[in-house]
Amino acid sequence: MKVVFKQPTAKVSEVFLSVQGEGVYAGEPHVFVRFHGCNMRCAFCDTPQPVAPEESSIRSIVDRIVDANAGNTAGAITITGGEPLLHSHFLKCLLPPLKEKGYSIHLDTNGTMPDRLNDVIGAVDIIAMDIKLPSSTKDKHFWEEHLAFLHAAKSRKVFVKMVITDETQESDIDKAVALIESVDSGIPLVLQPASEFGEFKSRPDVARIMGWQKKAREKLTDVRVIPQLHKIEGIR
Ligand code: SF4
């Protein structure tokens, strides 16, 4: 009897070439692979969620990356979502061939699934990890998960990103800064003012954010305020 192995697939919303708009690598050309679905519901979420995301094989994603980067513009791939670690078993198969092609692999994650990070960390170069402040997200807190995640992530290049809205509480910032300091005070922290879109209106006060930056720099060596570049420039 002939045994047929089913090829792994995952729901992928889009594959495209653009400029990294967030964090310490903002401005670099990246190919983005956006996975469908998330385990969180952040008040400020602006991620497009297509009704019928494509069920994609590894072969088809690699082909779409090659097409998107036909001019060899990008040397890096950002794996994003939603929450890409929901698809960690699939990523375990997808990432090694992409690394073999010479790409630097960036993982953009909400930092809430430390066990799943361990599945893929060997094939990841850079981890852009969110700490989700409950006063910003209006979702539940993930302090324990974030702490375990950052401990696992520090074996790679990692930086932390926190979205700031006009409802963010200073006590959340203090807690997050203490969490990072307890792991490694040299891990870069990006304070990212939330972008307005649709009915979500939030204009966090810049002077307030700079005050939090100053306070955080008493504990951490690298704290930056970086808005979403692609929103300012109208890039995808
Ligand atoms: S973790 Fe990211 S994708 Fe998920 S709801 Fe929050 S902002 Fe949206």
Image (tube, rainbow, N blue to C red):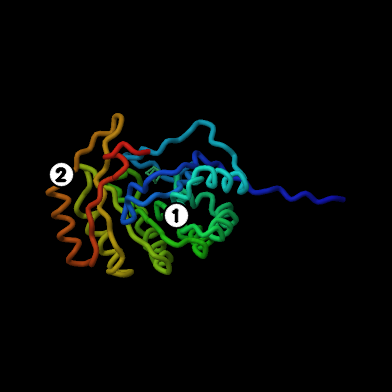
Secondary structure category for the residue under label 1: strand
* Front residue of this view, candidates 135 and 4: 4
Q: Where is residue 56 in the image (x, y as percent from the top left)?
A: 59, 42
Closer to us: 116 or 223: 223
Q: Name the residue under label 2.
A: 205
Residue 63 or 3: which is nearer the viewer?
Answer: 63
User: Along the horizontal axis of the image, is 218 left or right of 71?
Assistant: left
* Cα distance between the residues tagged 1 and 2: 33 Å
Q: Residue at x 54, y 54 (%)?
A: 88
Q: In the rendering, at what x and y percent does residue 179 appear? A: 30, 63
Residue at coordinates 39% horizontally, 67% vertically from top-left?
154
Decide: is 235 above or below 59: above
For image coordinates 27% across by 55% down, the residue present is 190
Q: Name the residue under label 1.
A: 76
User: At x 28% / y 59%, what residue is drawn?
Assistant: 189
Above or below — where is 236 with respect to 163?
A: above
Q: In this view, does 3 lie to the left or right of 194?
A: right
Q: Give percent across and percent down for residue 138.
A: 31, 43
Q: Is residue 7 left or right of residue 182?
A: right
Q: Is residue 163 left or right of residue 121?
A: left
Query: Within 8 Å: ligand 1 and the Cβ of disc 2?
Result: no
Q: Earlier in the sequence, mark 1 or mark 2?
A: 1
Q: In which quarter of the image is residue 43?
A: top left
Q: Residue furthest front?
A: 71
Q: What is the three-letter code of the residue carrying label 2?
A: Asp
Rendering quadrant holding ligand 1 = top left
